[in-house]
């Protein structure tokens, strides 16, 4: 049975469970439930603190897990990223009072407060900077006001919280993070259960990004229409009862669907329909 770690709370929890549900797996109905067995799919889910997931997976206690790239790298565990999941995106940046520093090279001799001590320590080392790192569990923006540090390193979304604290972001991002699937480094690459899980998750990603588009068009315009809707490999083109017309079916990016429909209509296509995709295998 495949043993999978899933975040039990925080910004990763609900999107991860929703994606697993879309992939056909059972998910818990009670937040207090810590272990759930999906016997039909031969999977056992363990709902854990997001920060601990990389440790369990890296130790080999669990086969794979869903966590943030920032948490994976901060853990220092022997686990590696094997798939990006496209949600819970964030940027990790340095911030300080205006005029304190312009880039990471200016941090020599300073003290930096963060909730991701491992990640920041490694970033400083990679840039040859000798600085002190203080680990805090949260609300790191107050560390400068209280004199604990001159600089902070934290997840930045809009930057409003930092500006309200009188701080400014500087330098290049330390890391761009998102939710990822991880497994133990050196684990067998050909595990059929893991491959099946990844195919299901990839199917959800594709289904979320694409819609199925159907339309009718005259034969003489097919090549131009197909250029607008090439699909993933090639569209399906079928003759209609009325001579000189064909029906075309193709997958198109959801974000471009309205524009493509307009261009097809101008080309002479009619009965243009889009349908959501709930699951797929490529």
Image (cartoon, helix red, strand yellow):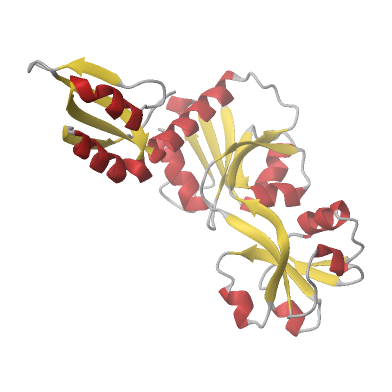
Look at the image and tell me in which quarter the N terminus lies: top right
Viewer-proximal residue, 141 or 61? 141
Please report the residue visible at 66 percent of the width from the left and 73 percent of the height from the top.
139
Residue 156 horizontal/vertical position (percent): 61, 65
Residue 30 horizontal/vertical position (percent): 43, 51
Residue 128 horizontal/vertical position (percent): 90, 56
Please report the residue visible at 54 percent of the width from the left and 47 percent of the height from the top.
34
Residue 255 horizontal/vertical position (percent): 37, 45
Residue farthest to the left, as pictured: 242
| 164 in relation to 194, above or below | below
Q: Where is residue 81, by image quadrant?
A: top right
Please report the residue visible at 30 percent of the width from the left and 40 percent of the height from the top.
260
Q: Where is residue 57, by image quadrant?
A: top right
Is residue 30 something that shows in the picture? yes
In the displayed structure image, the side of residue 63 where residue 98 appears, left or right = right
In the displayed structure image, the side of residue 19 where residue 149 appears, left or right = right
């Amino acid at each position: 049975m495949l043993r999978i770690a899933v975040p039990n709370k925080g910004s990763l929890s609900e999107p991860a469970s929703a994606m697993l549900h879309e992939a056909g797996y059972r998910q818990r109905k009670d937040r207090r439930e810590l272990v759930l067995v999906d016997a039909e799919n031969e999977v056992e889910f363990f709902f854990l603190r997001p920060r601990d997931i990389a440790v369990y997976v890296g130790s080999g206690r669990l086969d794979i897990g869903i966590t943030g790239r920032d948490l994976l790298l901060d853990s220092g565990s022997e686990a590696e990223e094997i798939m990006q999941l496209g949600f819970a995106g964030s940027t990790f940046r340095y911030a300080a009072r205006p005029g304190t520093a312009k880039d990471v090279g200016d941090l020599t001799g300073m003290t930096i407060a963060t909730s991701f001590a491992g990640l920041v320590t490694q970033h400083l080392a990679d840039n040859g900077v000798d600085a002190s790192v203080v680990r805090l569990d949260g609300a790191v923006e107050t560390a400068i006001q209280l004199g604990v540090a001159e600089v902070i390193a934290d997840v930045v979304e809009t930057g409003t919280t930092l500006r309200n604290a009188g701080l400014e972001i500087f330098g290049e991002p330390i890391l761009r993070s998102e939710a990822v699937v991880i497994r133990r480094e050196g684990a067998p690459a050909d595990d059929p259960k893991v491959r099946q899980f990844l195919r299901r998750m990839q199917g959800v990603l594709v289904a979320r990004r694409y819609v199925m588009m159907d339309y009718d068009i005259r034969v003489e315009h097919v090549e131009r229409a197909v250029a607008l809707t090439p699909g993933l490999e090639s569209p399906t083109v079928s003759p209609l009862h009325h001579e000189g017309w064909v029906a075309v079916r193709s997958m198109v990016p959801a974000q471009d669907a309205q524009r493509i429909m307009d261009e097809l209509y101008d080309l002479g296509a009619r009965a243009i329909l889009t349908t959501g995709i709930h699951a797929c295998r490529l």
